[in-house]
């Protein structure tokens, strides 16, 4: 049971990572649980990524409490997670990492084990705090179960991270303006006039714009798929998880 089993005589986890299971959250988790350089930052980065969905779950579980209480519980959970982390029995055999983390959160909130005063903080940069603040208001307004709120906010986090990566790629290659004009086509918010007006504005032929749009969508799909594959235990689960994520994002984003 998450948070209730530990490993005796734990050593470095590098050897526990299957050779065909690289660049996944479980790989990051096992690296963070080891003693190699960067393990602490890897754990902190993992906690920062899951902060918004954990907050959303708590906010929906106790809507009568204010945002400050939800923030305290979120911070308390991650502080406890970090404290117990070195001795947790974790790995890809646990399935999806978000499901494992949600089970840990449920156990934490049920108070089935001794809590201690938080001893470690999750350091979140200012820009991420601003994004989290926007998520907070949205999480409080979701009319669904805490579990679904967790999944919706997680789906949005994954999609927005993918969109951010896509934008960074286009900007770094000097195509920031093209990115900004193509983005509405990707998110279904295309402006009146469609391709013809957009092509004229960008000084491209309509055919060239369609090719650019196809490449834009293709690259976004690659990035998003990589992000989703980073959250499942088996590569064959990626497509199912991707469909679920997109269905949540499409439904959840309409409420924002």
Image (spheres, helix red, strand yellow):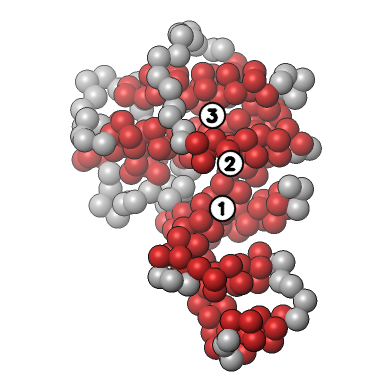
> Compared to 221, does 113 lie above or below?
above
Q: Which mark is residue 131?
A: 2
Which residue, given by chain and number where applicable, does mark 1 sit on? 160
Place residue 129 in its image quadrant: top right
Place residue 40 in its image quadrant: top left
Query: Which label sits in the foreground, 1 or 3?
Result: 1
Question: What element does badge 2 sit on?
Answer: helix
Place residue 25 in its image quadrant: top left
Marks 1/3: CA–CA distance: 24 Å
Residue placed at 40% from the left, 65% from the top? Answer: 172
- In this image, 7 relative to 107: left or right? left
Which residue, given by chain and number where applicable, does mark 3 sit on? 103
Residue placed at 32% from the left, 24% from the top? Answer: 86
Circles 2 and 1, Cβ within 8 Å, touching? The answer is yes
User: How many C-alpha atoms fall within 10 Å of the one at disc 1: few (<14), some, or many (≥20)?
Assistant: some
Among the two numbered marks 2 and 3 on one chain, the one whose residue lies closer to the N terminus = 3
Among the two numbered marks 2 and 1 on one chain, the one whose residue lies closer to the N terminus = 2
User: How many C-alpha atoms fall within 10 Å of the one at disc 3: few (<14), some, or many (≥20)?
Assistant: some
Question: What element does badge 3 sit on?
Answer: helix
Marks 2/3: CA–CA distance: 25 Å
Question: What element does badge 1 sit on?
Answer: helix
> Compared to 158, does 28 lie above or below?
above
Query: Which label sits in the foreground, 2 or 3?
Result: 2
């Amino acid at each position: 049971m998450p948070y209730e089993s530990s490993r005796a005589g734990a050593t470095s986890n590098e050897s526990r990572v299957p050779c065909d299971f690289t660049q996944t959250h479980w790989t990051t988790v096992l690296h963070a649980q080891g003693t190699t350089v960067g393990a602490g930052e890897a754990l902190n980065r993992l906690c920062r990524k899951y902060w918004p969905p954990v907050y959303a779950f708590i906010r929906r579980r106790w809507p009568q409490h204010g945002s400050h209480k939800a923030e305290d519980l979120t911070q308390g959970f991650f502080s406890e997670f970090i404290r117990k982390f070195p001795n947790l029995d974790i790995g890809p055999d646990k399935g999806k990492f978000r499901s494992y983390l949600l089970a840990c959160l449920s156990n934490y909130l049920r108070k089935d084990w001794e809590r201690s005063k938080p001893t470690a903080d999750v350091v979140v940069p200012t820009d991420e705090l601003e994004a989290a603040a926007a998520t907070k208001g949205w999480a409080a307004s979701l009319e669904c179960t805490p579990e679904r709120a967790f999944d919706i906010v997680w789906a949005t986090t994954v999609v927005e991270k993918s969109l951010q990566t896509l934008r960074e790629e286009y900007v770094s290659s000097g195509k920031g303006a093209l990115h900004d004009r193509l983005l509405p086509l990707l998110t279904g918010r295309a402006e009146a006039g469609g391709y013809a007006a957009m092509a004229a504005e960008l000084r491209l032929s309509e055919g060239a714009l369609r090719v650019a749009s196809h490449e834009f969508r293709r690259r976004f799909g690659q990035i998003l798929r990589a992000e989703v594959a980073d959250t499942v235990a088996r590569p064959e689960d990626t497509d199912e998880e991707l469909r679920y994520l997109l269905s949540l994002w499409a439904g959840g984003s309409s409420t924002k």
